[in-house]
Amino acid sequence: MAPIRTLSKLGLYVTLFLVAFFLFKESTYFLAFTSNQDTRSYFNASRIGSPSDVRADVRTRNTSGPICGEECPPGDAIVPDNYDSLFYNADVKPFIGGAVCGSPFNYLPRYDNPCWMAGMLSGNTSGSAARVLGMDLGNEMECQLRCLPLVHLAGFSKSGTADLYRALKKHPYFVHTRKEPLFWSYGRFDRNYTIDKYINEIQYRVDQIRNFTQTVEGQLRHPKLMIDASSAKMYFMDGYRYVPGQENLDEPKFTTAMSIKALIPEAKIIVIMRNPIDRTYSRYRMFCHTCTPAEFHEFVTGFMSEMKFCLKHQTLRGCAYNYTLFASRMPCGTEQHSMFIRASLYYVYVKDWLAVFRRDQIYFVHAEEFFSQRSPIIKRILTFLGLDHRLITGDNWRVIADKPPTNVGVLKGRLGDGMLNVTRMLLDQFFRPYNEMLAKLLNDTRFLWR
């Protein structure tokens, strides 16, 4: 028994030694980090309670100008009001203040795209408090450029968003990233899709932003831009009741527009809208591969019945965001979702976004006009974005003008080329008053679709 007790004591001593060594090493990293001449990190002790709270209360104050070769703007990042509601499951707190300099709330002034320098550990510590604090054994802090998209092609799906995105990419100042990360529409309601993952997905060409420079009035600038073309972010809020403070609401109090505005205050929004009747039918065709025009008519009449009932008990906005409305199965087995029609209630969603962004931050595109006059529309959008359309080469202009529409005709032969006349008349009657409200809101009769 004596040898066993001796081994037990030896194991205890070894354990105590390792714990002491770990604590000493951690304190060394922490002291080295907080004593850095260029940064001063501090904690608001009254709020610290969990690792996420620690990340929220680590802030960086710039005290000596350039860090990592970039000039950081002065001042501290401020956690916005209603943080948990604006950024549900989008933990941007680790990025507020950053571990080195700059943040999504304090962007680098010489970059036209919202970018900041972040202290990242060289090891795989993504999303952890250690990554922000710089306290991870065996890893060193690295200064990395991080960016978020300035330009958002916010909607609407099945309205020519793919063609518009590909045309804009012909401009040399656009950095090519994944078209639809889907973070701001579906992803932020998914606990496994964090903003850390979102930023990582679009960083793989961030060096193009850093390395491309231009001298403007004697100042060196980085003019390249990122674009997020997730075309459902304008309207998709089906998870809004998961957001703190909205659990029992009939309609969302906090919208995606509010979240993007809080994170990217000067974001540029592009919205393309197609005749809602055609958009609805196109969306339905995309999901129901074997449905017939008669089955589409049955779907429309069923939705109309439930929508009529909904409007007796809720506001138009409440019904437009009501994801429980008319949820059933299609004849082909695919989930039949009222979003096919609800997403075409443009007025509701446009009004919500205009309540958040200035009118000069949103450019509205009439889809049918874009289909017939691509080059002039692209030139106007580039002017809206502050980009010189003359930088697009002649060959690329010919591609923009002549390339056939994307995602058209893929399902030809399944539903045929048209819907039943009686269905079109029913949808026209349904959408007409909302199109009139949209045209009045935008002071633009093109959106009457007459």
Image (cartoon, helix red, strand yellow):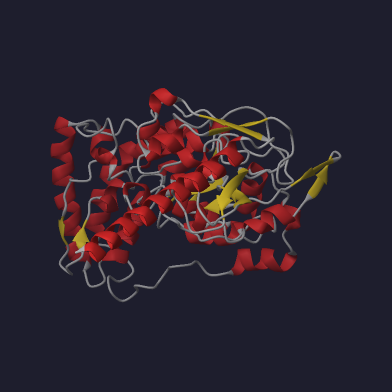
- Residue appearing at x 68%, y 33% in the figure: 73
Q: In the displayed image of the protein, which residue is found farthest to the right?
A: 218
Which quadrant of the figure contains the N terminus?
Answer: bottom left
Q: In the displayed image of the protein, which residue is found farthest to the top?
A: 46
- Residue appearing at x 43%, y 68% in the figure: 407
Q: In the displayed image of the protein, which residue is found farthest to the bottom?
A: 413
Q: Is residue 268 visible?
A: no
Q: Is residue 346 visible?
A: yes
**Rendered image quadrant of residue 203:** bottom right
Judge from the rendering whether residue 437 lies leftward or rightward of residue 377; answer left or right.
left
The percent coordinates of residue 9 (x first, y second) are: 30, 56
- Up-down: is 285 above or below 386? below
The percent coordinates of residue 121 (x first, y second) are: 55, 53
Asked whether 396 or 427 is in front, the reply is 396
- Up-down: is 231 above or below 404? above
Asked whether 81 or 253 is in front, the reply is 81
Asked whether 290 or 213 is in front, the reply is 213
- Up-down: is 46 above or below 69? above
Question: How many labels, in total?
Answer: 0
Judge from the rendering whether residue 201 lies leftward or rightward of residue 66; answer left or right.
left
- Residue appearing at x 59%, y 45% in the figure: 118
The percent coordinates of residue 86 (x first, y second) are: 39, 35
The percent coordinates of residue 193 (x first, y second) are: 37, 53
**Rendered image quadrant of residue 239:** top left
Judge from the rendering whether residue 200 lies leftward or rightward of residue 110; answer left or right.
left
Judge from the rendering whether residue 292 lies leftward or rightward of residue 152; answer left or right.
left
